[in-house]
Structure formats: C-alpha cells, structure tokens
Amino acid sequence: MEKKKYQDIVKKYTPQEDRTYHGIVAFVIGGVMGVLGQLLLDLYANWFHLPTTDAAPFMIITLIFFASLFTSLGFFDKWVAWAKAGLIIPITGFAHSMMSAALEYKKEGFVTGIGANMFKLAGTVIIFGVVSSYLFGFIRLVIFGG
Amino acid sequence: MMLYVNSFLFAGFICLLAQIILDNTKLTPGHVTTIFVVVGAFLDTFCIYDKIILHVGGGALVPITSFGHLLIHGALARAHDFGIMGLLMGMFDLTASGIIAAIVFSFFFSLIFKAKD
C-alpha cells in the first residue's frame, strides 16, 4: 500500500514529456534546414555558375561552418536541446558533435585530448556508414552490376 | 519553387521520424543518426535515394541519410573503373569535403574558444 502511494506521487511529479510538441518542433526546424540547404544550393549555383550537383559540397561546408561556429560560441547547445532531432539529423548535428567533443576535451591536451576524442561521438556515423556502404555496394555490384 | 516545398516536407519528415524514435525508445541520438546513415546507404542499393534527390533537391542532401548515399556512390564510381577493389578506393571521394571541413573547423575553433557550461 505504501509502495503504491509512493509510486503515485513519483508519477505525479515526473516531468511530462510533450511528445506532440517535440515532434512538431523537430518537423518545422528540420524542414527549415532543408529549405536553407536548397536556398544555399541555388545561391552558390548562381554566384559561381556551377551546375547544382557541384554546388552541394559548398552548401554542406557552409552549414558545417556555421554549426561549428555557433557551437563554439555557446548558444547552439541550447538550440539542439530545444529542437532535438530537428538539428541532430541534418549535417549540423554531425558538426555539433565533433565541435563539442573538441571543446570538451581541449583541457586534456592536443594529442590525448582533441586528437583522440574529436571523433568520439561522430565516429560511429562514419564507421557504420562505411561498413554498410561496403556491404550494400558489394551487393549492388554483384547483383545489379554497379 | 516546388523544390522548396518538397525540401521542407522531406527534411521535416525525416526529422519527425527521428524525433518519434527518440521519444518512444531508449535509443540515444548517436544510435538514431547511425541508423539513418545505414538507411541512406540501403536505399541506394536500389537507386531509390537518387530519385528522391531529383525530386527534393537540397532537402534530401541536408539530412544525415545523404551521408550514406554519398559514401556508397563514391565507392561505386571507383568500382565502375576498377572492379571489386574499387569499392575500397573511392568511398570518401564525395564525403571528403564534409568530413574535412568538420575536422578543420572544429580544430581551429577549439583553439580559439573555450567550453562553456
């Protein structure tokens, strides 16, 4: 009886996560990032007279630059905490994870700190991306002929 | 103009999907980004992601799924010329700009700025 009462009280005071709100925020912010990407693609294609496919690296570098800069200035963490998947899933999340690892381990020195820990969070993305691409690439090469 | 609407809807949909996974399971953001990269590479086994990019444009290039797509395409471009060994040669060809930019900017910004907490 005591235990049940206790659990009820705990349940009452656990902060309720509003999943609908989180979902809407992630959808809108993610969508805005997508529009931003398309906008930058068009801008670079016009400025440098590039075909749109060649402007893609320019766009990705720009997004990574601003994500790294805003993270090191300190306020991007708050944005990520608010928008969650809306900023983690775009390429900004990749840059944010590397930048925050570099900043956090800076005090442990250049080699053992920044060098050893920069890929601590982003490394899984690269490793599983490479392994799965190798497997799927192999399948596509053997079955569909490339 | 249609590309902008599609970009918004597609990128938003990917992020919404990730947020639903995050909220309803015990997976961390690291797990979710990894899953999405693998899904991006998987979709390109059947040329699906190429078609998505044709219709959606920038909105399909911004989410991390495009990372898997670029990895497999770099590998296949070399495999086209060199056969099975080519799979190991060109994987970073297309993603190099993103990875190198992230490393260089992170390194130099970490020299200039301090961690704030």
Image (cartoon, grey):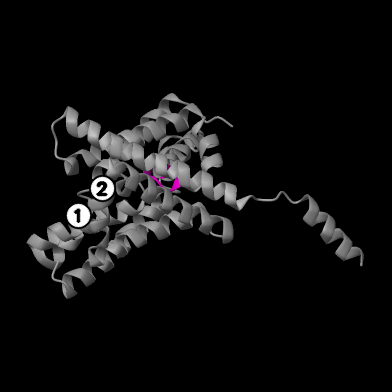
**Residue farthest left in this picture:** B81
**Residue farthest right in this picture:** A1
In the rendered image, which quarter contains the C terminus of chain B? top right
B63 and B57: which is toward the camera: B57
Q: Mark 2 points at which residue?
A: B95
A135 and B57: which is toward the camera: B57
- Above/below status of B34 relative to A110: below
Cα gap from disc 1 to disc 2, whole angstroms: 8 Å
Q: Name the residue under label 1.
A: B74
Q: To which quarter of the image does residue B74 belong?
A: bottom left
Q: Position of residue B13 (x, y in %)?
A: 42, 52
Please count the marks in the image.
Answer: 2
**Residue farthest front in this picture:** B2
Q: Does the magenta stretch include residue A90?
A: yes
Q: What element carries label 2?
A: loop
Label 2, residues with CA under 10 Å away: few <14, some 14-19, many ≥20: many
B14 and A84: which is toward the camera: B14
Which residue: 29% across, 35% down? Answer: A39
Residue A9 seen anywhere in this rendered image of the structure: yes
- Identify residue type, mark 2: Thr
Q: Are marks 1 and 2 in contact (CB under 8 Å)?
A: yes
Which residue: 18% across, 44% down? Answer: A53
Which span of residues is magenta-colored? A88-93
Left/right of residue A16 with respect to residue A89 in the rendered view: right
- Above/below status of A120 relative to A40: below
What secondary structure is the stretch in magenta mostly built from? helix
In the rendered image, which quarter contains the N terminus of chain B? top left
Q: Is mark 1 on a helix, strand or loop?
A: helix
Which residue: 74% across, 51% down? Answer: A14
